[in-house]
Image (cartoon, helix red, strand yellow):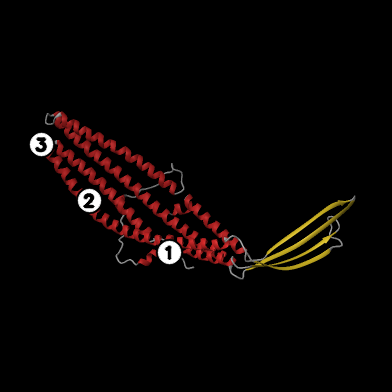
Amino acid sequence: ITEAMSAAPDLRIQAERVVQAELALRQAGASLFPALSLSGGSGTRNVDGRESGSTDLSLGASYELDLWGRIAAGADASRASLVATRHDYDAARLSMSASVATTWFQVLTLQERIDIARRNLDIAERVLRVVQARYDNGAASALELSQQRSTVLNQRKAIEPLEVQLRQTRSALAILLGRSPQASVAADVRLHSLHVPHVSAGLPSDLLLRRPDIAASEARLEAAAANIAAARAALLPSISLSAGAGIGSAALLSLADTTRTLSLSASVVQKIFDGGRLRTEVELQRSRQRELLETHRRTLLVALKEVEDALADSARDANQEAVQREILAEAERSLRLAELRYREGADGLLTVLDAQRSLFSAQDQLAQLQLARLSNAVDMYRALGGGWHNAAP
């Protein structure tokens, strides 16, 4: 997970979006300051055969008085958008952590399932040797020998798809870590050594406020309110101040014998008729705010559902895993008894074959239930915003 946080391409993409939002805020804040411009030029002209030159240099300043708060509201909207983008980055980090953990659990589970398949292949080959010995001594039929050989071949065939799936899952994990798909990923931990932490009852619903997607939704609501304020302020007159100073000369590329000028001006601009564009912009921003409000409400409802589902899934998987362990114990006992009775001639091979299939199925299902329980634990922590908290503003 630490490697993914520093090297995953998806996170780097989201980090650049944060940089872009910071630059957009800087750009919006620049409108609160005066603008200065410097210009200069030199040229010649010929009128009726008489050539004359001129050179001038001027400095200008302009500043819009933000009496109604339009520019400040635009900066506030950009600031809130930046906060939302940062929370989106936090949400991406949380999602990446969960994806890496879940994919790693899948790798461990596939390794466990391959080991189970190989152990069952060993059992099938061991039984085949018993059947072969009984067949050589005339105590078993050719049908029984053929049936057990088919069982051995099916066990061998079951291993290859799992190995292919393991390679594909390892490649997916390598991509999450920012590595090439061919890079190996160490997974030397056994699945049964992992334990799901217990989630105690009585968790407060305030934990949902730790979710970065909810924090991002709140920030977008703040940006929408600022956009409405900016749109309403645009209905009012704009007042601009400007000043300029310059020097000029009748000489080419020279400022000798200069003429100096200084100018100060103020302007007031009020839209009289624009076809309702500005008022429509206000209504548009209000509609967007209502949309974001409903989006925020939906985000909260989805968060509650995710927590509820994760709690229910965790309880279900814990119960099913406990029952499956009992089933596995009985399947192991049944196979031992079936083999013993077959060696003694008390039962036929069919009983042994059924016991082998039951054992393999019980072991494989237990591994998949362990994966489901671990994955649901990850979903629980992600639903509660685990590993992340909203920093003080």
The residue positioned 25% from the left and 34% from the top of the image is 153
Q: Quadrant of residue 40?
A: bottom right
- Label 2: few (<14), some or many (≥20) within 10 Å? some
* Of the pair 308 and 355, the residue shown nearer to us: 308
Residue under pointer 1: 389
- Of labels 1 and 3, the one closer to you: 1
Question: Is the residue 322 above or below the residue 120 in the image?
Answer: below
Find numbered disc 3 in the image and state the secondary structure of the residue it sits on.
loop
In this image, 221 relative to 359: left or right? right
Q: Quadrant of residue 38?
A: bottom right
* Amino acid type, label 3: Gly
Gap between marks 2 and 1 measured at Cα: 37 Å
Q: Quadrant of residue 346?
A: top left
* CB contact under 8 Å: marks 1 and 3: no
Across and down, in percent, residue 281 comes to 55, 61
The residue positioned 51% from the left and 60% from the top of the image is 284
The residue positioned 82% from the left and 53% from the top of the image is 43
Find numbered disc 2 in the image and state the secondary structure of the residue it sits on.
helix
Residue under pointer 2: 324
Residue under pointer 3: 345
Which circle's residue, 2 or 1, is located before the other in the chain? 2
* Amino acid type, label 2: Gln
Which circle's residue, 3 or 2, is located before the other in the chain? 2
- Label 1: few (<14), some or many (≥20) within 10 Å? some
Gap between marks 1 and 3 measured at Cα: 67 Å
* Amino acid type, label 1: His
Question: Is the residue 47 above or below the residue 81 in the image?
Answer: above
Across and down, in percent, residue 253 comes to 83, 55
